[in-house]
């Protein structure tokens, strides 16, 4: 019986899952470093989180509900005195973790091969430039995002004792570290690094450019954009028609003067702490301000909007990361040869 001969595979063609294996082999050190940083962060939170829960039990706070009650105040003061440094320093350091994890994996991903010229060899092994860049971007981005997501879940558990004291999930120093936003910021750092790597073709300058771009985006989001995802609720804080602000809301305070315009805060401070009123009670100071025509207003975002804001921020960060990824592929196809 005659047999049908199958044509031999092209010399050097990539086997099934070949690009995945090659990507892992080439970038396992960077991935191990990123996962190591996130692993250290998770380890820190596990150790200190268990320590904090042990302290809550020894102080009797695990049976004192709510923690904001007056009878819990003394024990809460002791707990905060012991762990405020852990909490404050930890949250500050964690803000920049997505930046370093994303940029240090994204920027060298393509820039190193473009810088050294090894990409030409990869394209002669049966792997076209489009498949080459997409495989690298997708596989490494997925690994970074999943690891960052696990870190975000651990952080939500870690800060739970402070939420019980009235902290808000909407607080700027917490919002970016929880939910889907933390992995989204890691992903956008990776996308910025990869795009800068292809555009600049040098690893170190690409890292620097991506860091600057990420920092500018993060600062603009935290100080301007995030507050405007949904119109804030504004209420009068004192006097006739005053309303109560919900607990654990993200609030901004402003004052208006006798003519309804913004108040010069230096003038307001001088009025509050003039020699005549230096020892006045809070209610007396408030009464004086009311008589002088000053009004305090509170604008707030209730904590019930947390997941709404998370979805908005995570959504536009994902869209931007996809656009950067598409731009990176386009640059490789048209400029890397």
Image (spheres, rainbow, N blue to C red):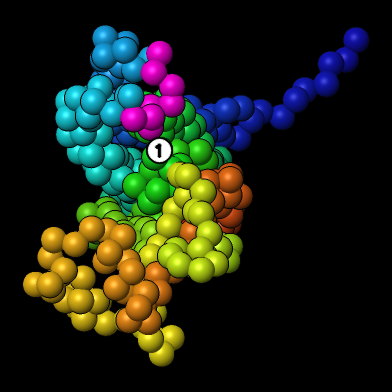
- Residue at point 51%, 54% (across, down): 244
Dot 1 crowding, Cα within 10 Å, few <14, some 14–19, many 20+: some
Quarter containing the C terminus: bottom left
Q: Nearer the viewer, residue 112 or 100?
A: 100
Q: Position of residue 249 (x, y in %)?
A: 47, 50
Q: Is residue 191 visible?
A: no
Residue 326 location, quadrant: bottom right
- Read off the residue under disc 1: 166
Q: Nearer the viewer, residue 55 or 90?
A: 55
Q: Position of residue 212 (x, y in %)?
A: 28, 62
Q: Is residue 222 visible?
A: yes
Lateral position of residue 231 relative to residue 21, left or right: right
* Magenta stretch, residue numbers: 63-70
- Residue at point 83%, 21% (across, down): 4
- Residue at point 31%, 45% (across, down): 95
- The kind of secondary structure element at disc 1 is loop
Q: Position of residue 239 (x, y in %)?
A: 45, 67
């Amino acid at each position: 019986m005659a047999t049908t001969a199958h044509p031999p595979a092209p010399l050097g063609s990539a086997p099934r899952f070949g690009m995945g294996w090659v990507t892992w082999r080439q970038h396992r050190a960077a991935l191990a470093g990123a996962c190591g940083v996130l692993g250290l962060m998770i380890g820190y939170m596990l150790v200190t989180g268990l320590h904090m829960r042990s302290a809550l039990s020894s102080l009797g706070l695990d049976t004192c509900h709510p923690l904001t009650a007056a009878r819990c105040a003394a024990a809460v003061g002791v707990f905060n005195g012991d762990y405020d440094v852990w909490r404050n320093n930890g949250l500050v350091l964690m803000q920049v973790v997505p930046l370093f994890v994303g940029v240090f994996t994204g920027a060298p991903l393509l820039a190193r091969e473009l810088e050294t010229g090894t990409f030409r060899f990869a394209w002669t092994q049966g792997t076209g430039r489009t498949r080459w860049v997409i495989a690298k971007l997708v596989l490494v981005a997925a690994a970074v995002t999943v690891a960052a997501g696990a870190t975000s879940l651990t952080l939500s558990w870690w800060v739970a004792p402070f939420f019980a004291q009235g902290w808000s999930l909407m607080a700027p120093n917490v919002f970016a570290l929880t939910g889907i936003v933390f992995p989204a910021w890691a992903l956008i750092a990776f996308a910025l690094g990869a795009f800068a790597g292809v555009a600049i073709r040098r690893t170190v300058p690409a890292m620097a450019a991506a860091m600057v771009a990420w920092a500018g985006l993060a600062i603009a989001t935290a100080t301007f954009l995030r507050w405007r995802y949904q119109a804030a609720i504004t209420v009068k804080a004192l006097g006739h028609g005053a309303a109560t602000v919900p607990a654990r809301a993200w609030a901004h305070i402003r004052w208006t003067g006798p003519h309804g315009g913004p108040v010069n805060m230096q003038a307001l401070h001088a009025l509050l702490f003039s020699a005549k009123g230096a020892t006045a009670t809070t209610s007396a100071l408030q009464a004086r301000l009311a008589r002088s025509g000053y009004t305090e207003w509170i604008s707030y975002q209730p904590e019930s909007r947390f997941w709404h804001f998370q979805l908005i921020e995570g959504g536009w960060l994902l869209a931007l990361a996809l656009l950067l990824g598409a731009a990176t592929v386009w640059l490789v196809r048209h400029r890397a040869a």
